[in-house]
Amino acid sequence: MENNYKEIHQSAIVVDLHNDYMEERINHPEYRLFANDKHHTDVARLKKGGVNVQFFVIWTRPDDYKNHFARAIKLIDILNHDIDECNGEIKLAGNYSDILSIVDSKKIAAVVCLEGGQLIGRNVNNVNRLYERGMRYLTLAWNYGTEWCGGANDENSKGITEFGKQVIDRLNELGVMIDVSHVNKKSLEDVLNYTDRTVIATHSGAYDVNESKRNLSDEHIKEIARRGGVIGSVFYPYFLNNTDKATIKDVLKHINYIAELTGNVDCIALGSDFDGIDITPAGLENVSKFPNLTQALVNEGYTEDEIIKILGANALRVFKNICG
Ligand SMILES: [Zn+2]
């Protein structure tokens, strides 16, 4: 048992769909990806945690900028710079074959993703520009959405506008995954009604386990699963159990619930939100701790095949289908 989980973790391609390194990097300019023992993320700890594919989030607080698109480009430049400082240990990936070749060469694949429709600005062609800079998923809204898509803290009646539909069309044309974490209920329903494509929720839990606005209803979990999408298991204690203290067992509660609800683990992935959360569950304090989750999944009775899917194969399946 003891070694078994290490072997499983080693053999899996571990994919974390949501890491906010860039937020901490901007708040603390001395904090760098190539070497750091602060916050949650750096190369050494990613390696220790067996992370093979890391999605790096570009995000802006809606009130902070007039031109969010320009800020997004600037942040992508900074991320590229920080990756360049890592001496080839981390490499940007734009498609599935990039990921496989980077992982084969024992390096970490980085994928750029954007959190919040404000980053698009009011010009749908900015979606193309961000795609060219590596964006492979867009979280349609953050907690406070835009005029075209409601976020979790917006009024419930706020849905997707015509411009929002244009953004969705463009994402679908280019092969960018649509992330519905943070999106309010009405907008999520509008998205599901407007497009029949696979969607993902990169860092959310199950509402029936913990009644947080950031968690998904049974109906939406089942629909995301039916479309072949994934839900990234989030580690934020308040989303897990509505307190500031959580353990790996709380993460498992959401995983177990979703597996039981959908009948299998095919829609379950990882979306830690490391460096975007100020508190973490005991045992999952930073990116080096992912093996502890694998150990817990083994102890919970999940099969090797199921664990490999949860750790990354499910997320890669969607990435390959949508991003190519
Ligand atoms: Zn988030």
Image (tube, rainbow, N blue to C red):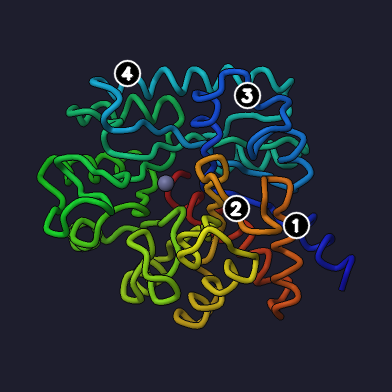
Disc 2: CA contacts within 10 A as few (<14), some (14-19) or many (>=20): many
Residue annotated with mark 1: 291
Disc 2 element:
loop
**Is there a contact, CB below 8 Å, between mark 2 and mark 1?**
no
Please state if 194 lies on the left or on the right of 3 as rendered.
Answer: left
* Residue type indicated by callout 2: Thr
Residue annotated with mark 3: 31
* Residue type indicated by callout 4: Ala
> Which numbered disc flags the more N-terminal residue, 1 or 4?
4
Residue annotated with mark 4: 70
Name which residue lies at 32% across and 44% down: 142
* Residue type indicated by callout 1: Pro
**In terms of image quadrants, where is residue 44?**
top right
The N terminus lies in which quarter of the figure?
bottom right
> Which numbered disc flags the more N-terminal residue, 2 or 1?
2
Q: CA distance from mark 1 to mark 4?
A: 38 Å
**Is there a contact, CB below 8 Å, between mark 3 and mark 2?**
no
The mark lying in front, picked from 2 and 4, is 2
Disc 1: CA contacts within 10 A as few (<14), some (14-19) or many (>=20): many
Vertical placement of residue 84 versus 287, above or below: above
Vertical placement of residue 231 versus 175, above or below: below
In terms of depth relative to the viewer, which is nearer, 49 or 314?
Answer: 49
Residue annotated with mark 2: 280
Point out residue 313 in the picture as x, y percentages from the top left corner.
61, 59
Q: CA distance from mark 4 to mark 3?
A: 23 Å
* Residue type indicated by callout 3: Tyr
